Image (spheres, grey):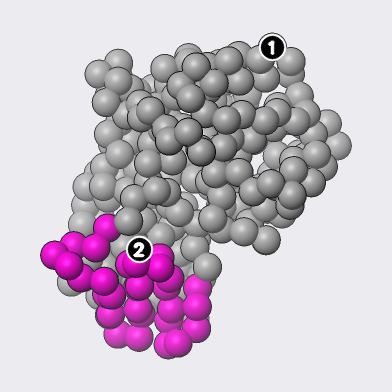
Amino acid sequence: MKQKLANSEIERAIVIPAPESRILVVEDEPAYQRLIRFNLETKGYAVACVASGEEALTFIAEQMPDLVMLDIMLPGMDGFEVCKRIREVTHSVCIIMLTAKNTAQDKVKGLELGADDYLAKPFSAPEMLARVGAVLRRAQQHEAPHGQTVIKVDGLEIDLLRRRVTIDGLEMPLSPTEYRLLHCLAANAGTVLTHDYLLEQVWGAGYSGLHEMLRVTLWRLRQKMEKDPSNPRYIITYPGVGYVLA
């Protein structure tokens, strides 16, 4: 899997945030915590830091941030458990997992639990800022193509103004990345979209080739949307090519 963004792609992906963008850093290593905080604050983010999963959950319950940067290796409750508990109560906050192991298994597990992206330690400040900017940009975008405010496909309804998704009348909570992916597929219903097209449209520049990230996010969508995820009604796979919302 591609792990590093090219310099030009990093520069394009970095976004100066709105002043109200709030980030919670969950990191027990003081050096990393100081480094992350310094670089985020220089770009205008409002940053809070905690050193444990328990503190993170308390903070989120009291002050919902826009993004959580969540280390996997934490004392007591690890980052995977924290991610799981966050997704049990909210799908609106973005989550970037921080891993020192840099293994595919850790990345996949974090994505399966609802993380939007990951960073492998050690990472550079430009790479970190690119990932943060891209995730926040995706969460803040509200597309309504050609004046359209609702997309309807065979029992599936996406309200673009309220970012509300229902299937057969039942509301389906989605994380920001899951919503973007479903929106992209629904806006092109009936058209097979390639892996790299989806990665670029949903995640942004520099994510081409990260097919595992796309596959895991599709798996999460199917778990929520389909009565029988192994025999999907909506999102159909074209092996070696991509996906289509039928």
Which residue is rendered at x = 45% and y = 64% of the image? 221
Residue 56, given in percent of the width and then of the height, sits at: 74, 40
Q: Is residue 3 left or right of residue 190?
A: right
Q: Is residue 37 left or right of residue 245?
A: right
Location of mark 1 (residue) = 31
Which residue is rendered at x = 64% and y = 48% of the image? 64
- Image quadrant occupied by the N terminus: top left
Location of mark 2 (residue) = 182
For marks 2 and 1 on the same chain, the one whose residue lies earlier in the sequence:
1
Residue 101, given in percent of the width and then of the height, sits at: 62, 26
Gap in angstroms between the C-alphas marked 2 and 1: 38 Å
Residue span colored magenta? 143-172
Q: Is residue 96 above or below residue 160?
A: above
Q: How many marks?
A: 2
State whether residue 177 appears in this view.
Answer: yes
Q: Is residue 223 above or below residue 43?
A: below
